[in-house]
Image: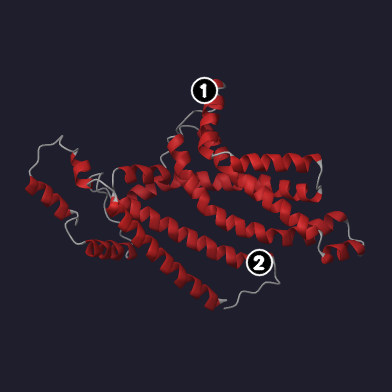
Amino acid sequence: MLNYIISRLLQGALVIFLISLATFVIMRMLPGDPVMLLLGEGEIQITQEQIDAIRAKWGLDRPYYEQYLVWAGNMLRGDFGDSLIRRGVPVRDMIFEAMPVTGRLNVMAFALALLISLPAGIVAGVKRNSPFDYATTIGSTIGVALPNFWFGLMGIIVFALMLRWVPPFGLKTWQGYVLPVVVLASEQMAVFTRVMRGATIETLSQDYVRTATAKGLSRQVVILRHAVRNALLPVVTVIGFRIAFLFSGTIVIEQIFALPGLGRLFVDSLYRLDYQVVQSLVVLLAALVVFINLLTDLAYAFVDPRIRIER
């Protein structure tokens, strides 16, 4: 087990390095100059010597490989650098300021999705071809097909502007979380429900389930103690995989509902070519996805004791 964890951590470090390098290159390929955006492109009268001095202050006059090595070295020490656009504000402060909003949104959305989708998928699998199963299948298909940005905009129009049940944007009250959380959770619920239903149906057809039933165990015991636990394996895989999509969906949702989270910070920094912020966010999210994938693999042994991870 220890050798496997070390191997996965080394693989994850390589992935993070490649992602950081690709992000660095792509940011430098984007059109525009962050210094000119900082100065307002002509709004401030400034000489070329002053522009060169600003570029030298931020290290933008150095070769690209040197810029990357300096930035990567600082990242390894926990120094994310300073923002180019917000006049020297530490990137770490900007991330820590936006992180609680994104964290609360994702935790609540994920919890809501699991609380609804797992029981619904189990019941739909047990009661196959029932009206509940048909309704669940239709709802899951719609949930997967609907883009979350369209769902969010329709939610604002109906529930915020027409019915006035929730605010259309912002987080001044707890009601501000309702629409973003529901929109974020909707697609996850659809995916988890479909996977849980399919896994439950497949597990119920296994020989050990029929054997447990033949021994006289109640239907409830057979389902909960024998079928559901083994049916959770593919769900655990999908949960780890969907976490990355949950964070990518947060970028869109935070823009729609004007929420001051990491998604909005990422988009604003990308538009303004704030290299340090974009690169730091991408690396942090990549590290989070690598860590979640490792936890997903380790969770297999907990969900099913028959599985032993060896390398």
Mark 1 residue type:
Leu
Mark 2: secondary structure: helix
Q: Position of residue 168 (x, y in %)?
A: 48, 28
Task: Name the disc covering residue 161, or none.
Answer: 1
Pointer 1: residues within 10 angstroms few (<14), some, or many (20+)? Answer: some
User: Are circles 1 and 2 on residues that touch, CB within 8 Å?
Assistant: no
Q: Position of residue 93 (x, y in %)?
A: 33, 50
User: In the picture, which quadrant includes the N terminus?
Assistant: bottom right
Q: Report the residue at 49% width, 59% height from top.
A: 289
Pointer 2: residues within 10 angstroms few (<14), some, or many (20+)? Answer: few
In the image: residue 185, left or right of residue 51: right
Mark 2 residue type:
Phe
Task: Name the disc covering residue 66, or none.
Answer: none
In this orientation, which residue lies closer to the viewer: 154 or 287?
154
Q: Is residue 258 above or below residue 164?
A: below
> Mark 2 — residue?
302
The tag earlier along the polypeptide, 1 or 2, is: 1
Distance from label 1 to label 2 (Cα)? 47 Å
Q: Position of residue 58 (x, y in %)?
A: 19, 54
Q: Picture quarter containing residue 216?
A: bottom right
Q: Report the residue at 49% width, 75% height from top.
A: 7
